[in-house]
Image: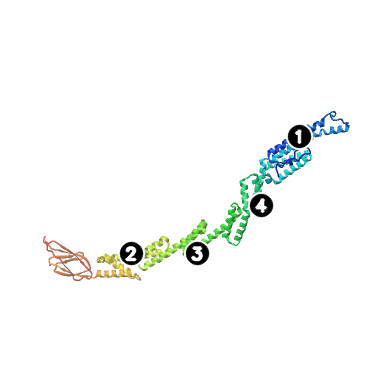
Amino acid sequence: MEEGLRPPPAPRDGVSVTAIKDTKSPNLKLRAMLGLVLGLVLVVVLLLPSMVDDPESRSPAPATETQTEVVAGNLPELPVIDHFRADAEQALQNFLRMQARPDLHNAEIWAYEDWQRAFSTAASGDDEFGQGNFAAALGAYEEAGAALKALVDNREQILQQSLTAGWKYLQEDTVNDASRAFERVLAMQPGHQDATLGLARSAVREQVLSLVINARQAEISNALPLAAETYGLALQLDPLYLPVREALEKVAGELRKRAFQDSMGRALQGIERGQYAVAEKALVDAAGINPGHSAIKDARERLLSARRQDRLTALRSQAEQFESTENWEAARQAYVQALAIDSQAAFGRNGLARVQQKLALHQQLDHYLADTTRLFSDDPLNNARELLAVHHNSAANEPLLEEKLVRLEHAVRLAIIPVGLLIISDNLTEITIYKIGRLGRFEQKQVSLRPGKYTITGSRQGYRDVLKVIELKPGGNGQSVDIRTREQI
């Protein structure tokens, strides 16, 4: 509605609401008011004296009782009419001041019907004023002013109701109604944060709903990546739209579930095929999706067990290979590693015991073969004989062991074959072989002794003793030694 309503021109000099409709500034309105006041003054000055003058002062005319009664009857009515007129004009000014209040800025937008009703009522007052019905005009102007005052009093309530309605309409996807409600709020309070947000969300709701339809069709077609992408585009347009967020979370959850299942499938397949690096990577991927899932723990235990079993199998194979080549130390190390992985592995315990026996046997054989002269003594010789007797049949498929046993057996045999020794003396010296016995005096004597080192001494009364150490080697027949005392004391 246009501002600045005024009553229409009165039969004489009244000022109407309609006549001031085109007034565009406060100065023009002031001039109109001044004109109205001047008009009232002229009425009082010019008309009122003529109505109350003494009959004798008028031009001669026959006075009748009837005329006097008419004049007398009209005089009391003028102040009442003027009173209603002044009140009507005052009510109009009150209406105009109410209209100009900042509280009613853009009221023709945010309270269109009430605003139009108020101005329609004021316009009817213009009509009544123009017809001289000042009391009716007064009532219309007061009613119109009261309507505007009600808008002022209810302004905050209207704002909150419009804001609430806007969110309700937006929630129901009634986009046009939502936009109008938020626009009413912004007309009342430009820059209102919630209304600005609501209007912005309303502006993209149609596009969001179109994307939602496409995303749901992709869901039905099981094209979940496309559905997630489309929901994501909708959420970019309106990050606060809860249905889109929930739908995206649902699709994303299903995608994560499928990705988790795929990763776990690859992990288990890798374990079955012995592709442990592939299985490990797949489990890392699965943990990245759902780190706390119990299936990951179970699969890791299976992977660890499979790797352990494969390692045990490999060590067992290596140990058996080392045994087949009589590399007993390497086999021992392989069995020790196996038992470190699984202390209850039977092949590890049995294999370790077996190779340790072989190592001990070889160490004994190596001990005698490294210095066969040890066999020239009774205790080492007897030990070697016993060793040979125990392991005589232990060399099956063990060439190295067999070769050592043969060498030791030969050394033992040579160690027990006597070697001939010719002792030459002077028939004056007493000859003694340490640990063999006293041989007496002679010029030559042939004795048979086992290979080894012997200490021979010669003694004679009045002479210094002589001592010689001789080593009899196996197969060394023809050896001789000259021993006699020569140095007198």
- Residue drawn at x 45%, y 62% as measured from the top left: 307
- Amino acid type, label 2: Ala
Mark 4 or mark 3, whichever is nearer to me: 4
Question: From the viewer's perspective, is 419 left or right of 186?
Answer: left
Cα separation, mark 2 vs mark 1, equals: 145 Å
Cα separation, mark 4 vs mark 3, equals: 57 Å
Residue 439 pos. (x, y %): 17, 67
Indicate which disc, 2 or 4, sits on the residue closer to the N terminus: 4
- Amino acid type, label 1: Leu
Disc ID at residue 360: 2
Question: From the viewer's perspective, is 150 left or right of 78?
Answer: left
Cα separation, mark 2 vs mark 4, equals: 99 Å
Mark 3 or mark 2, whichever is nearer to me: 3
Instruction: Report the front residue among 170 and 110.
Output: 110
Indicate which disc, 1 or 3, sits on the residue closer to the N terminus: 1
Q: Are marks 4 and 1 in contact (CB under 8 Å)?
A: no
Element under disc 3: helix
Residue labelled with disc 1: 40
- Residue drawn at x 31%, y 70% as measured from the top left: 403
User: Can residue 356 be seen at all in this image of the molecule?
Assistant: no
Element under disc 1: helix
- Indicate whether 456 appears above or below 169: below
* Quarter of the rendering occupied by the C terminus: bottom left
Indicate which disc, 4 or 1, sits on the residue closer to the N terminus: 1
